[in-house]
Image: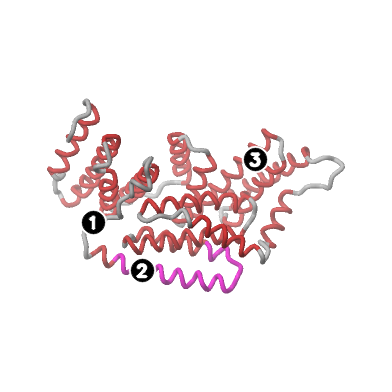
Amino acid sequence: MARSLAEKHQELETLLEATGESLEVGYGRALRNAIAENDTCMEVETLKCLGDLHLEKGQLVKELKEFKTASTFYSAALLRCKDPDLKEAIQDRTAFMGKLAEILQPKDSRSYNVTKERQDTLRTGAPVNDVLRVAEVCHNLSLARFEGLSGMYVLEEGYTKALIPAIATGDRLLEIELVKNLGDLYLETGKACADESLLSKAIAMYNNARTRCDDTGGKEALTHRVKYAESVQGTAIRMRRGSNVYDHGAVDTEEDPDGTAIMRTYREHHRMGDQALRKGDVDLAERRFASVLKLVHGTGSGHLNKEAETLQKLGDVYLERGKVTKKTLPKVLLSTTHLWQEQKTDSPRKI
């Protein structure tokens, strides 16, 4: 059963509160995931939330630049919004912000119109000489890449962090290029791992970039990328039907000494596994949780609770499958889960 927009928003707020991350970072990831999942409603909602964040900040610090940033996010949300009620709500916020900006604007200076300035920027786009600048930004971000699935998450985070300021400043050229690069990243990794969910993300990213692109040649190139990604996805689906659980690759502990990449990979797999389980796709959920179990297994006593949590998730998968197949939970999983539960509650001991 599909979750409502309000439920998704509440889930996001709960996650942000639990992780303690800044709202802008959390909303940035939510925006990226909304684009990757082709969830336009959540994409608009996230952009609106980013606008609200800067509107509130502008009211606190009394600075026009915060209103400009808020206006950019609202304008970006309006470009994507198809719901008339939500459009009206965003327009009301923009009008309110314009009044606040007029109060702050010095009387002897020119009149300031946030909405008009933002629309002019969106219409004219980035200058031609910005092409080299955009290429340099993306190239510098790509230098952070290292091998393995954890390497994908490092680069994914880099692109996401750059995407938010690109939208905030109305830099359409950079915004489109970053979304396209995220598509390339998902395509490359999805092809290597035969992971159709990553390939679906690649297709969604390419389609999103194509929608925003005004250049005919750029649109044609993105269309070719979509067709190629769809072809690769078809191959991955056929491979999935004829093979067992695949391994996404281990995280190199030498390149991730503090375990940050491991935990990011762990959380992402759990998120996608939970999502697959909610949709009833127990096979995909099983692969996700099996991959993350391989990721954290044998990485030290500090991750034993993560192994226990993942084993419980696998148990949930087998219970759901058992409702259909009438098979019981595998004995190995039952005994192992019990053993890890003891490890969590008792004093540490070797397994």
Please determine whether, in this image, residue 201 is positioned above or below residue 274: below
Label 3: which residue?
55
- Left or right? Give the position of 146 relative to 47: left
Q: Magenta span has 82?
A: no
- Kindly report the distance in space between the C-alpha atoms of the residues bearing marks 3 and 1: 47 Å
Q: Position of residue 271 (x, y in %)?
A: 36, 46
Please identify the quadrant where the C terminus is shown: top left
Q: Residue furthest right?
A: 108
Q: Residues within 10 Å of mark 3 (few under 14, many from 20)?
A: many
Disc 1 versus disc 2: distance between alpha carbons?
18 Å
Tell me, yes or no, whether the two marked residues, 3 and 1, touch with CB atoms within 8 Å: no
Residue shown at 48% from the left, 47% from the top: 30
Could you tell whether 195 is left or right of 157 in the image? left
**Which image quadrant for residue 335?**
top left
> Residue at label 1?
245
Q: Which residue is mark 2?
A: 232
Residue type at the position of mark 1 = Val
Name the residue located 55 percent from the left edge and 51 percent from the top edge. 162
Residue type highlighted by circle 2: Val
Residue with the most extreme left position:
331
State the SS at label 3.
helix
Does the magenta portion include 214? yes
Task: Give the number of callouts.
Answer: 3
